[in-house]
Image (cartoon, grey):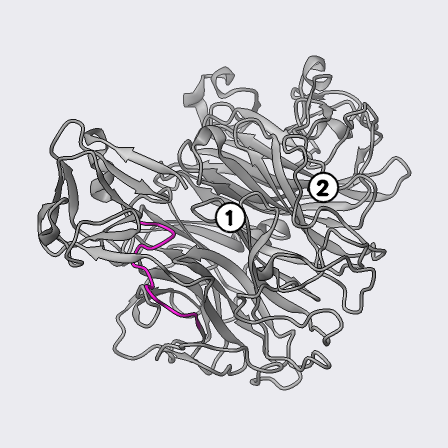
């Protein structure tokens, strides 16, 4: 538990403070809410965001909006040049939901067929601050010439100050492969968007750019490629460009080796630079692509040394790399990129190698990580023959910037002695362990996800765990886990059980640093507090299932894990394997997961398998699917035990008449400052568990006045 004291100099912060992830507009004393959308056409819920006032935004698509009550206000957005000429006549929408998820307050949507969906919703504000500007992205289907792939847009209002009536700007982007699948972009607190577009592992193009607050590509001083206003290209720092920065149209990171040598060293000293790898070993090269070439690149020609790198790797025939993930730390606007490189092993076999790169706001490279050793702590040079990918990135805001973490969701296809770093071999955490330290068993041709926490400042690995659920019918299990909440499941660090493919699609971090994921697996470990449990080994057959999981902040254990799948026959597993989850959002005392129930392709218009267990479905929802149906699941992870004190009127914090609870708030209370109320603090003893701003404000009337907020 951390305690913070706030003096008068934090007045501006406190007049705006709300609880972003725990109790703001909270579902107090709530139970789980699991529902389908109530429509008869196809729908999907893709992404969710929680607003200052506790209400939610949910993005997705639908064939129609007939399942939304006719009295719900609707606002149609102008697509502003977004092309979707070969689309599928869907409606991309944003639902504005009440804080208890029971009421659709508003629907903001594009015209039917204008876009394929609303895939992601992001804000410019940091957690714990008032909702900033709202940005969205969505899929499109059109030609390369029409920038078919995905779009990024800024709304002209944020649902708190007012309902959006239009797009402030929109940028359509050509994208296939990873950029199309992942939509790698994010927005900083300055309203600037960093994004990646193009293709992955082909012969055409992939690039990163940064948009200014008006949606215009801008100059990034320390990126190394710049498009001049004359139409030519300059390689070097922006300040060195002919005519200076004013002669530059925009800057780029270029994920292509033919004719370019970005992400490579340009001098022999940088190429030969040996530096720590973040986990007790070392590596050679200032830049992550140095390992695939025999010498530095030459920016004057876009070429440079070819041949094998120092561990024997060389690049594959395809020119374009694989940009896949991007996140911005909104406190500093530093940004982090995930990618992989299609490579060739020394024996000529194909491979894929990952890289995570950290840049500061000016575009200077801070650090990069391979996620495995190239030079082990004993000095041995190694290759890692499994394919590896970076699927998602997230910022852990639970600590100050100086000690905060980047959370990496990566994936390994296959296994070998050198792979993504194991949870019990983290140099910065001697004696520590991950919930699942390593790849086990004899099934090599499978995909396993992996989580790692890295220090934002220097890329030091602090914790890691694999995510590999058991294979149905495995043996060689370890002893049962002793934590009662882990419900008697075998310890994944015991024995040598076979695993099966486990792939995660989204990662988020809670206010206390716990890590939330949505994934798909087979014999998935579920907890005693799960909404929907799996059957344990020896007790029945598990279907392939989507699941939601919360890892403890150090990744050493699991605090919550639940299936979201059709109710299945435990003897055969029949009836499940029929959902897909896309997003997880930490919310009040639980998580919100979004996805869909699959259509039965053998009988169009009907749903595959059995319905998922539902709970407290709102009037706009349904307890049964109808063909392909959207799923929204608020899963309560443990009972709420806090009490609530709301302001009843303006007054002194220390006066019981100020509060609805009839007493002064304590460190166990959630305190709500209601609209127009001014609460004055003149002592240094005021305290609360959480503070929610709902239109009122807190005023500090004495120099040493303080309010302690516990987290």
Q: Nearer the viewer, residue 69 or 585?
A: 585
Magenta-span inclusion, residue 642: no
x 67%, y 32%: residue: 430
Which of the 4 image quarters holds residue 181?
bottom right
The label on residue 514 is: 1
Q: Give residue 415's position: percent from left, percent from top.
A: 81, 48
Q: Furthest-right residue in view?
A: 347
Q: Quadrant of the C terminus?
A: top left
What SS does tag 1 mark? Answer: loop
Q: In the figure, is residue 73 to the left or right of 476? A: left
Which of the 4 image quarters holds residue 121?
bottom left
Magenta-span inclusion, residue 27: yes
Would residue 90 be seen by someone viewing this image from the given angle?
Answer: no
Q: Which residues are magenta?
A: 19-33
Q: In the figure, is residue 706 to the left or right of 38? A: left
x 45%, y 17%: residue: 244
């Amino acid at each position: 538990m951390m305690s913070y004291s706030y003096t008068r100099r934090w007045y501006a912060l406190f007049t705006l403070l709300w609880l972003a992830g725990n109790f703001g507009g909270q579902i107090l004393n709530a139970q789980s809410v699991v529902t389908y959308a109530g429509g008869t056409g196809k729908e999907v819920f893709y992404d969710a965001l929680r607003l200052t006032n506790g209400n939610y935004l949910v993005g997705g698509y639908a064939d129609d909006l007939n399942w939304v009550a006719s009295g719900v206000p609707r606002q149609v957005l102008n697509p502003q040049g977004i092309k979707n000429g070969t689309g599928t006549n869907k409606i991309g929408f944003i639902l504005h939901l009440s804080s208890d998820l029971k009421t659709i307050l508003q629907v903001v949507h594009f015209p039917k067929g204008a876009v394929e969906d609303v895939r992601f919703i992001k804000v410019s504000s940091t957690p714990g601050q008032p909702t900033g500007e709202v940005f969205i992205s969505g899929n499109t289907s059109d030609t390369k010439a029409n920038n078919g792939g995905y779009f990024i847009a800024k709304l002209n209002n944020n649902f708190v100050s007012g309902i959006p009536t239009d797009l402030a700007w929109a940028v359509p982007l050509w994208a296939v492969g990873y950029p199309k699948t992942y939509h790698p972009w994010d927005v900083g607190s300055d309203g600037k968007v960093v994004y990646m577009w193009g293709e992955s592992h082909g012969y055409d193009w992939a690039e990163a750019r940064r948009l200014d607050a008006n949606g215009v590509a801008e100059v990034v001083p320390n990126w190394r490629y710049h498009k001049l206003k004359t139409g030519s290209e300059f390689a070097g720092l922006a300040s060195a460009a002919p005519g200076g920065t004013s002669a530059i149209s925009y800057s780029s990171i270029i994920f292509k080796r033919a004719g370019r040598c970005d992400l490579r060293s340009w001098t022999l000293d940088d190429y030969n630079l040996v530096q720590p790898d973040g986990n007790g070993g070392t590596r050679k090269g200032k830049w992550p692509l140095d390992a695939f070439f025999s010498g530095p690149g030459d920016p004057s020609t876009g070429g440079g040394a070819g041949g094998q790198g120092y561990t024997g790797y060389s690049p594959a025939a395809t020119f374009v790399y694989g940009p896949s993930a991007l996140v911005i730390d909104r406190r500093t606007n530093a940004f982090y990129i995930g990618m992989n490189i299609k490579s060739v092993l020394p024996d000529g076999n194909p491979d894929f190698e990952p890289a995570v790169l950290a840049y500061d706001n000016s575009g200077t490279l801070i650090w990069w990580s391979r996620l495995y050793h190239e030079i082990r702590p004993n000095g041995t040079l190694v290759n890692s023959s499994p394919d590896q990918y970076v699927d998602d990135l997230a910022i852990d805001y639970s600590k100050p910037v100086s000690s905060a973490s980047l959370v990496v969701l990566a994936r390994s296809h296959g296994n070998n002695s050198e792979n993504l770093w194991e949870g019990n071999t983290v140099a910065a955490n001697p004696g520590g362990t991950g919930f699942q330290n390593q790849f086990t068993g004899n099934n090599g041709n499978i995909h396993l996800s992996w989580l790692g926490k890295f220090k934002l400042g220097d890329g030091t690995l602090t914790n890691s765990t694999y995510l590999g659920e058991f294979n149905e019918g495995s043996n060689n299990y370890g002893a049962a886990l002793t934590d009662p909440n882990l419900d008697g499941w075998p310890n994944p660090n015991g024995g040598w059980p076979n695993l099966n493919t486990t792939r995660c699609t989204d990662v988020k971090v809670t206010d206390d640093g716990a890590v939330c994921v949505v994934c798909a697996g087979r014999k998935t470990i579920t907890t005693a507090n799960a909404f929907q449990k799996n059957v344990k080994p020896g007790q029945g057959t598990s279907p392939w299932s989507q699941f939601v999981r919360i890892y403890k902040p150090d990744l050493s254990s699991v605090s919550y894990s639940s299936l979201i799948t059709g109710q299945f026959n435990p003897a055969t597993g029949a009836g499940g394997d029929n959902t897909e989850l896309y997003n997880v959002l930490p919310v009040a005392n639980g998580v919100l997961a979004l996805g869909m129930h699959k259509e039965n392709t053998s009988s169009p218009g009907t749903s595959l398998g059995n319905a998922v267990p539902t709970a407290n479905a709102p009037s706009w929802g349904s307890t049964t699917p109808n063909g392909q149906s959207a799923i929204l699941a608020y899963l309560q992870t443990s009972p709420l035990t806090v009490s609530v004190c709301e302001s009843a009127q303006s007054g002194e914090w220390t006066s019981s008449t100020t509060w609805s609870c009839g007493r002064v708030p304590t460190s166990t209370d959630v305190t709500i400052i209601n609209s127009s109320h001014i609460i004055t603090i003149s002592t240094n003893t005021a305290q609360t568990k959480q503070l929610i701003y709902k239109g009122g404000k807190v005023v500090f009337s004495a120099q040493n006045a303080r309010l302690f907020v516990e987290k």
